[in-house]
Image (spheres, rainbow, N blue to C red):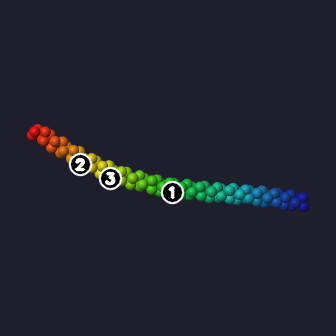
């Protein structure tokens, strides 16, 4: 009878030990799963933030290009106007020199 009680005690301890082992593994699996999901969420947030940043940069670049384009057009027009004014002044100067030489 003592041997049977001893074997039953060993069996109970074994079952408890195995149960504890499995519980720990399940806890670890759950913890790992939770951490993986959290990491996945963090990565997704980072990707979304990067996409937003890229879109904002793209908009900024497009605005800068448009601004530079407008400035370049204004500069070209200004240079053309300046060149026309210089051309007119040179013509007037040449006419004045001709008139002075004729007199």
Structural distance between the alpha carbons of marks 3 and 2: 17 Å
Q: Where is residue 85 shown, x and y percent of the image?
A: 24, 47
Look at discs 3 and 2 and give the one toward the viewer: 2
The residue at 30%/49% (across/down) is 78
Res. 41 mark = none
Question: As drawn, which residue projects farthest toward the front?
Answer: 103
Q: Secondary structure at mark 1?
A: helix
Q: Residues within 10 Å of mark 3 (few under 14, many from 20)?
A: few
Q: Is residue 71 left or right of residue 91?
A: right
- Secondary structure category for the residue under label 3: helix
Is the Cβ of the residue at disc 3 closer than 8 Å to that at disc 1? no
User: Can residue 29 be seen?
Assistant: no
Q: Can you give x and y, in whole percent of width and height, for residue 93 in the image?
A: 18, 42
- Of label 3 and label 2, which has the lower sequence position? 3
Tell which circle, 3 or 1, labels the residue nearer the N-terminal end. 1
- Report x, y in % for residue 45: 57, 57
Give the numbered dot on residue 73. 3
- Between 90 and 15, the one lying in front of the other is 90
| Mark 1 Cα-neighbour bin, 10 Å: few <14, some 14–19, many ≥20 | few
* Identity of the residue drawn at 32% across and 49% down: 75
Which residue occupies 27% across, 47% down?
A: 82
Q: Which labelled disc corresponds to residue 84?
A: 2
- Horizontal side of 101 relative to 43 (left or right) equals left
Query: Which is more toward the observer, 60 or 20?
Result: 60
Closer to the chain start, of discs 1 and 2, is 1
Whole-number angstrom distance, CA of label 1 to CA of label 2? 48 Å
Residue 97 drawn at (x, y percent): 14, 40
Residue sitting nearer the eye, 81 or 28:
81
């Amino acid at each position: 009878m003592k041997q049977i009680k001893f074997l039953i005690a060993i069996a109970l301890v074994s079952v408890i030990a195995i149960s504890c082992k499995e519980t720990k593994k399940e806890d670890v699996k759950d913890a790992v799963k939770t951490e993986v999901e959290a990491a996945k969420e963090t990565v997704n947030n980072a990707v979304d933030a990067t996409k937003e940043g890229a879109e904002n940069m793209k908009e900024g670049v497009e605005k800068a290009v448009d601004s530079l384009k407008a400035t370049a057009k204004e500069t070209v027009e200004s240079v053309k106007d300046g060149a026309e004014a210089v051309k007119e002044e040179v013509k007037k100067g040449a006419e004045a020199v001709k008139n002075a030489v004729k007199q």
